[in-house]
Amino acid sequence: MQLKPFMLDAWLDQYEHDIEFDLGASTGPTWTVNDILALADDETRHRFLNHNLVYSRPAGADSLREAIAEMQGVPIEAVQIMTGASEALVALMWLAAEPGANVIIPLPGYAPFAALPESLGLETRFYRVRRENGFRIDPDEIKRLADSKTKLILVNSPHHPTGATISDGEMEALHDFSAERGIQLVSEEVYHPIYHGRQTKSLARLPHATVISDLSKAFSLPGVRTGWMIEHNARRRQQYWTARAYFTVSNATTAEILSEIAIRKRDVVLGRAQETATRNLKLLESFMATHRDVLGWIPPQGGMTAFPWLVSGESARPFCQAATEHGILLAPGDCFDAPSHFRLGFAAAGDNFSKALDRFGEFVKSWSAKMVTA
Ligand SMILES: Cc1ncc(COP(=O)(O)O)c(C=O)c1O
């Protein structure tokens, strides 16, 4: 068994810790423990400071599952807590890994979507989220890839890294298509509900879908490592519980309480992320218009990342490398099998984004001047 290198995380880990302007991150404005505790009532703060550092339950603390169930409009039994969406992906691919089976996943996409099944010997079939097609997630392309050996179809909306979304109607049609064929439909929704165009609904409402979500992206609390699955099928749920108990046993109790506070106060936490993302995306729009001779883009419909490209068509890795020398971190598109692109996170820099764009603009100008004279 072989896991291929995680190019994106290797790149980020190399630069993220001492870069001046982080436009490489895929999250939003940050929070401290103090900030989150300030959102809680006295009783919860007291519970946080005095709870025992024991194992939590493999399914997750009851009160956290209750908060998620209420937010997602599902019964509490449908909620399985995981260590990030990452662990949910491992569990799903692990359980799908039968001889001869295939999984259908997006390209570009978050690297583990492909690396995990490939490492387990599953065949990976990719539907393309192409810029020539306006980054449309095409349900017909997904359906054409499916056959009797397909175990799982994964749809990530809002999509990372493009910010594309798929409509509720198209998702419902995919749900029915998958259910008729006994294929598991996985809705990876870590950026829900951050939208810049049409709002779409969580697939938690549909009986045969499996939802993966977390507190890392839309909530921008990746440090709590809280993820969850919504599953209406009791047999599958039992499998996730078992996978969970084998893989990591439970989440950290401290993180579970902080997560519960953030979910109960989601109007504040998500509100801040949406406000930051909306404001910064406007700034990015005018930036991209100014630099359209060098950079192309399709504005994201949701989430906190955009996936621009160099109009010259060359690999963006040297561009991203040179940007780090100007204090700007981006993520090269070859980490997503799309070399002329780069990922730009527009919400993590928060109020610093305008300054970051000024610096990035100077860099783009110096880069294109160099290219003209080269
Ligand atoms: C689409 C997507 N899913 C899952 C993850 C991992 O999330 P978590 O922090 O919940 O493990 C990421 C992180 O970048 C992501 O972009």
Image (tube, grey):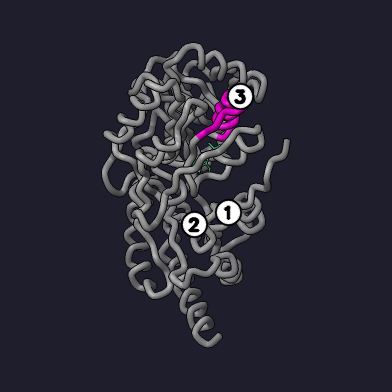
**Residue 199's spot in the image, x, y percent?**
28, 40
Residue occupying the point 38% across, 38% down: 192
Q: Nearer the viewer, mark 1 or mark 3?
A: 3
Residue 14 placed where, x, y %?
Answer: 66, 56
Q: Which residues are magenta?
A: 86-103
Query: In terms of image quadrants, where is residue 54?
Result: top right
Residue plotted at (31% across, 33% down): 201
Q: How much space separates mark 1 and mark 3, taking CA atoms? A: 28 Å
Q: Quadrant of residue 261?
A: top left
- Compared with 105, 321 (above or below) is below
| Amino acid beneath label 3 | Glu
Q: Say left or right for 141 vs 167.
A: right
Q: Position of residue 193 (x, y in %)?
A: 35, 38
Depth order, front residue of 206/17: 206
Question: Any magenta on residue 87?
Answer: yes
Q: SS for tag 1?
A: helix
Q: Which of the two labelled residues, at mark 2 and mark 3, occupies the earlier sequence position?
A: 3
Label drawn at residue 98: 3
Which residue in the protein does label 2 denote? 343
Amino acid, disc 1: Cys
Q: Are marks 1 and 2 in contact (CB under 8 Å)?
A: yes
For the point 52% across and 81% down, the residue is 371
For mark 3, give the secondary structure. Answer: loop
In the displayed image of the protein, which residue is found farthest to the right?
1
Does the closest atom of ligand 1 sit within 8 Å of the Cβ of label 2? Answer: no
Amino acid beneath label 2: Arg
In the image, 188: left or right of 242? left
The span from disc 2 to disc 3 (Cα, nearest Å) is: 34 Å
Please tell me which of labels 1 and 2 falls first in the chain.
1
Main secondary-structure element of the magenta-colored stretch: helix
Tell which tag, 1 or 2, sits nearer the viewer. Answer: 1
- Mark sitting on residue 335: 1
